[in-house]
Structures are given as structure tokens and as C-alpha cells.
Amino acid sequence: MNRLTYLILLMGIFSFSAHAQGVKTWRVDESTIMVEADTILHFTADGIPITLKAFNDSLATGKYIITSKEVGSTLEDYLTYKHPTAETLLGLPLPRKTFTDLNGKQVDVNAANFTIVSSWNKYCGICIAELTVLDLLAEDLPGVQFVALTGDPEDEVRTFLENACWKWRDVSVVIDTGRSLMHSFHIITDPSNLIVDGNGIIRAVVFGGDIRELVTTLDRLCRESIGSSR
């Protein structure tokens, strides 16, 4: 059994259930949720925890809707931007083809068969788990390169990676201060993954830390690419 097959079988350890028992949710409209849960957590659109007051104040601006995730007996409410999502870019060229990582290395999308552009932030545990899996997969996918795009400040990212001992050997960490690149890619939540082919065309979009879907989609695209080249 190769590493890819083994990891696909084990992806469940990083998955969060969207249908957990013990949580009942009624969506009244875009800004109101009534819920029976042990714990209710609130997050910004970037996945950063905030208070209920800050959450409601943000909703009052009319710029957001609510996305909810059930984890055990906990309900997590996320602000979600009201603008086009990355799926609208499927089949189109990635707006940016080259990146400079934390080490000053140039990453060129056209230099690999496929490139995964993955958004993340230091508060997102799902993102960290996902990037760790991608780093492990690199040995089995030599024609694929990985770009980890974060809007966190560079000094904070360096400190976080050093303190947490995250050493992603095959993942290029790229700083996107102000999330300007992510906005151009229509990325509104972390983690979001764009799978881009060697021509710079966005072939797939996978959201929300669904590592199983990400890995199987990438595997399918790689197989299709090999088949078409024969």
C-alpha cells in the first residue's frame, strides 16, 4: 500500500462532522440562529474567534451571512463574505502565476504539472492538519507543488512556525498581507484550496478542510493527466 492510499484511508482523523448528534439548528434568516448546544463559538470570516457582540455587530453591517459547522455538541458560527467564491474561477486562469515564499524562493505555477494553492492562518487547526498531510504527500506526487498562502503578518508567521516546530519541507509558505491575493482568488474562508494545472488553469476548488476530497480530487486529476499524455 503506497503512502497516498494509506493517507486517504486515514483522512478521517482530521475530519469534522457536519451532522453531529445532540445539536439542533434552526436558521430563521441570514442573521438569526436558534440552537440547542453545549457550546456556541463565533468566528470571523478568517476563522479568528470573536465575541458574540462583535459577531452580531459585523452581521449588522450587511456585508456577511452566517456559515455554521456542528462539531460534537458545539456549534461554530462563521461570518462569510457576501461576494463571489472561488468556484466562479473554475476553468479560468489563476490571476497570479508566481509567488515568493518566506525563504525568498520563487514558486512558478507553470513549473509543475499541478499546484495546490492553500489558504491558511495560524489560528486554524484544520489548516495546519491539512498542510501537514500535503507535506507528507509530496514524496508520492513529484509533479505537484504546494503553496500555503496566509494573510498573517510575516513576523508572526515566522514565530509561529518556529515555536510550533512546523517544518513543512515541501510546502512553500507565502505571505499575503491584507489577503489581497486571496481576495483576487475569491477565497473567503480558511482553508480553501485551488488546484491549478501547469497551464495556470484552476481545475478544482476544495473548501473547509475536507482533506479526503482534496487528496482524491488531486489523485484523479493526476491520473487523468497521465492518461491524456499517453
Image (spheres, helix red, strand yellow):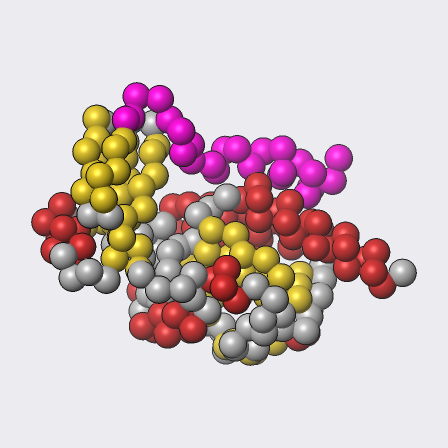
Q: Position of residue 213 (x, y in %)?
A: 57, 44
Q: Quadrant of the N terminus?
A: top right
Q: Residue furthest top?
A: 22
Q: Give the residue drawn at x 54%, y 56%.
A: 205
User: Foreground residue, 108 or 167?
Assistant: 108
Q: Can the viewer see residue 65 in this picture? A: yes
Residue 17 is covered by the magenta coloring: yes
Q: Give the residue drawn at x 46%, y 56%.
A: 192
Q: Residue furthest front?
A: 29
Q: Would you identify the image quadrant in which residue 21 lies?
A: top left
Q: Is the residue 181 above or below the residue 75 in the image?
A: below
Q: Quadrant of the C terminus?
A: bottom right
- Number of numbered markers: 0
Question: What residue span does the magenta drawing correspond to?
Answer: 1-24
User: Foreground residue, 199 or 32?
Assistant: 32
Q: Position of residue 219 (x, y in %)?
A: 69, 49
Q: Give the residue drawn at x 52%, y 77%.
A: 96
Q: Would you identify the image quadrant in which residue 180 lies?
A: bottom left
Q: Is residue 180 left or right of residue 61?
A: right
